[in-house]
Amino acid sequence: MNLVFIGPPGAGKGTQAWRLAEKYSFCHLSTGDILRAAVASQTPLGLQAEQLMRDGALVPDALILELLETYLKEHSCSSGVIFDGFPRTLPQASALGELLARAGMSLHAAVEFRIDDALLEERMRSRIAQMGVARADDTVETLRKRLAVYHEQTSPVLSYYRNCGLLLSIDGAADVDSVFQQIEKGLLFELLPEGA
Ligand code: AMP
């Protein structure tokens, strides 16, 4: 099963993707994690992405697509892939469709994590108060920028998948376990083996 997880920064996509991937042996492809690793090891990709990420802007589509193709070449994902934080733009969404089609694969669902901007800001403030700043883009100012980018550039991706009949919207404000249950329930017919 191939899934995309779409939601604003801090909505919990990574945690849920990790859990679902563990349970069903899916590959978990987080473009953000791959980019952060590239920045940490100062690869050419990392050097190009670093400032954009720090500013809360998107990394150009061409770099993201290259990263994605490399990942899929290097990993065997026969059970499926969770694309976490990708696609974030319409060109990325159509490129993903083409890439999957070329590999004889398809997308089963796009999971949208719905959550208010104000709640995300509140969560970030309390996390920083408790644990300090964990990442270069971990500031309220950058969060606001990233939210603006999300509404502007990523929202059209939601409409795109809604029109394809693939969108599953879940309440991202709920606690971690109930978000997981919502996702599993939403995907139930796809996840259960036939006749179960
Ligand atoms: P994330 O961990 O998914 O929130 O991503 C962290 C940062 O990496 C984002 O703010 C972007 O700068 C960059 N990034 C991650 N995924 C993408 C993507 N699919 N397209 C463009 N930029 C991305």
Image (cartoon, rainbow, N blue to C red):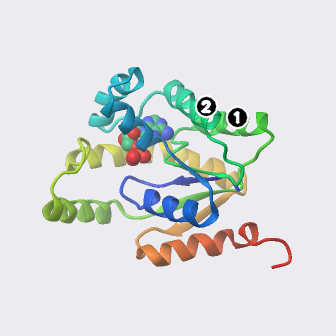
* 144 vs 44: above or below: below
For the point 57% across and 46% down, the residue is 157
Amino acid type, callout 2: Glu
Residue 129, position as x, y percentages in the image: 13, 63
Q: Is residue 120 left or right of residue 103?
A: left
For the point 35% across and 49% down, the residue is 147
Q: Is residue 149 visible?
A: no
How far is disc 2 from disc 1 in space, using C-alphas?
8 Å
For the point 42% across and 75% down, the residue is 174
Q: Is residue 72 visible?
A: yes
Q: Is residue 47 left or right of residue 81?
A: left
Quarter of the displayed picture in which ligand 1 can be seen? top left
The quadrant in which the C terminus is found is bottom right
Name the mark on residue 195: none
Circles 2 and 1, Cβ within 8 Å, touching? The answer is yes
Name the mark on residue 99: 1
The answer to which quarter of the image holds residue 87 is top right
* Pointer 2 or 1: first along the chain: 2
Instruction: Classify mark 2: helix, strand or loop.
Output: helix
Nearest-to-viewer mark from 2 and 1: 2
Q: Residues within 10 Å of mark 2 (few under 14, many from 20)?
A: few
Residue 170, position as x, y percentages in the image: 53, 68
Disc 1 within 8 angstroms of ligand 1 (CB)? no
Residue 113, position as x, y percentages in the image: 49, 62
Name the mark on residue 69: 2
The quadrant in which the N terminus is found is bottom right
The answer to which of 147 and 68 lies nearer the viewer is 68
Amino acid type, callout 1: Leu
The answer to which quarter of the image holds residue 36 is top left
Q: Residues within 10 Å of mark 1 (few under 14, many from 20)?
A: some
